[in-house]
Amino acid sequence: MMKILAIESSCDETAAAVVEDGRTVLSSVIASQVEEHRLYGGVVPEIASRRHAEAIVPVVTEALAQAELTLADIDALAVTYAPGLIGALLVGVNFAKGLSLSAGLPLVPVHHLRSHIASNYISNPELKPPFLCLVVSGGHSHIVMAEDYTKMTIIGRTRDDAAGEAFDKAARTMGMPYPGGIELDKVAEDGDPHAFKLPRPIVHGAPYDFSFSGLKTAVLNLLHNAAQKGEELNKADVCASFRYAVVDCLVTNFVKAAQDLGVTKLVIAGGVSANSLLRRTLAAACEQRGWELYMPEKALCGDNAAMVGAQGYYEFISGRRADSDLNAYATMSIEEG
Ligand code: KG4
Ligand code: ZN
């Protein structure tokens, strides 16, 4: 049995967790800063770094306490080192490096998007690679072939906004607080997805790539035109139509990629994998084709450290180690990981 203490600080959540053998969560603590960033309509990097620095010690202490363990019971440390806000990542990375040195524990660097995928190993104990994964978060939208736990190939990517970013921008346009994706999803449940015709942007010559920035503009135009005519649009209908357009693009390309590659095991991950319509639509598409579909439980879709402990385990057994010169990186391909 291998116990990993994992740390995550890539964006606006300071998190720590203890995970056993990559699959069993012994504790998971998340200190969210979202309320504070909401005042500014988005994450303010300077504030994020400060709050991480304040929260990291209590959060790690709490993760050990909830697992009823001490550092002496821990076999290795895992930390998110890329991609993300550089100042935010550095808080976790520097803390983990110090702890690794002082406690004499091996340190494993973990790629944030790989850890999102690994949230599925916790929610679905029987899941093993290879599979095709749709990774949709606030900063990234990828279709990734996971050949193994630590070997991944990007099949498709967004050319502009990430799916979560598109949801957040559209929500903000409609006056919803940051991060609006969650609320937009809720409001959309009461709307008609066919009320407004929105484009389904495609990227010519790259059938698995996404483009969402035009969709945001389309919603803006819809709202402005109505405002100029003094019309009040049904907010639920706008949300439902927008959500349908984004999910349609995601599902169409994901299913096409699976078909073309002959893969029948599909996985979703990242903050947007909590989206109700995405989950329902993919479940139906996979059931119709007799494909397997795996999703993280909703509590593990957003940023957390349990998923870092899960991926950290597989990185560890593949021989991955960091030493005291480990750096943080704002950008890093999931393939390099
Ligand atoms: O993975 P995540 O927690 O952080 C990043 O790594 O970026 O993703 C956050 C994103 C935000 O854009 C948020 O609005 C979006 O995930 N999100 C959703 C839903 N829940 C979270 N988007 C649509 N529907 C949801 N239910
Ligand atoms: Zn994330």
Image (tube, rainbow, N blue to C red):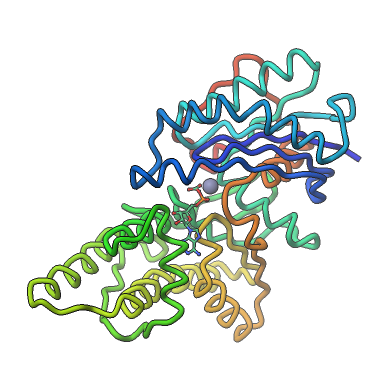
Instruction: Name the residue at 62% across, 63% down.
Output: 267
Residue closest to the far left: 228
Quarter of the picture containing the C terminus is top right
> In the image, residue 70 lies at what x, y percent?
86, 28
256 lies above or below 91: below
49 lies left or right of 221: right
Q: Nearer the viewer, residue 282 or 4?
A: 4
167 lies above or below 292: above
Instruction: Name the residue at 60% across, 20% down.
Output: 94
For residue 121, which quarter of the picture? Answer: bottom right
Q: Nearer the viewer, residue 63 or 269?
A: 63
> In the image, residue 294 lies at what x, y percent?
67, 67
> In the image, residue 291 lies at what x, y percent?
65, 77
Instruction: Name the residue at 58% across, 38% down.
Output: 111
109 lies left or right of 84: right
264 lies left or right of 87: right
> In the image, residue 177 lies at what x, y percent?
38, 56
